[in-house]
């Protein structure tokens, strides 16, 4: 179960309706869509579409993930 994450002054780029587990590492330049659940490491310039769920993954820089995706237990390489 993912806990609801609230944006703070330290991480204002995360929309308030994004669910973020404590172990998540999120780059400041990542663009996250609405209603996304994440529990992973997300690098710079990553775009994640709305209503996607990313669990136990490493997302390298410059990756684009579409809407309504469910991705878990993987590494997505640079530029995918």
Image: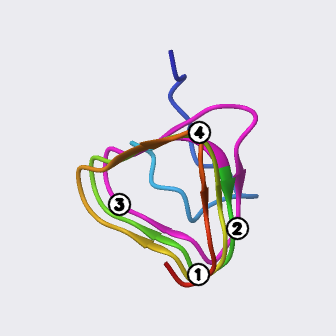
Looking at the image, which residue sits at the far left?
68
x then y, percent, for residue 63: 51, 76
Which residue was labeled with disc 1? 45
Spatial separation of the CA atoms under disc 4 and disc 2: 19 Å
Instruction: Count neighbours of disc 3 (C-alpha within 10 A) and say few if under 14, some if 14 to 19, many if 20 or more.
Output: some
How far apart are the alpha carbons under marks 1 and 3?
13 Å
Observer-nearest of 50 and 9: 50
Q: Which residue is mark 3?
A: 33
What kind of element bears circle 2?
Answer: loop
The residue where tag 2 is placed is 27
Bin the neighbour count of mark 4 within 10 Å (Cα to Cα): few under 14, some 14-19, many 20 and up: few
Q: Which residue is mark 4?
A: 73
Which of discs 1 and 4 lies nearer the camera? The answer is 4
> Mark 4 falls on what kind of element?
loop
Query: Residue 74: image x %, image y %?
Result: 59, 48
Residues 62 and 25: in front is: 62
| Range covered by the magenta-colored residues | 19-40
């Amino acid at each position: 179960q993912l806990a609801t994450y609230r944006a703070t002054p330290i991480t204002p780029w995360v929309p308030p309706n994004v669910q973020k587990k404590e172990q998540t590492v999120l780059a400041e330049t990542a663009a996250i869509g609405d209603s996304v659940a994440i529990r992973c490491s997300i690098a710079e310039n990553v775009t994640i579409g709305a209503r996607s769920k990313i669990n136990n993954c490493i997302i390298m820089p410059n990756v684009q993930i579409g809407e309504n995706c469910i991705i878990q237990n993987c590494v997505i390489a640079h530029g995918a």
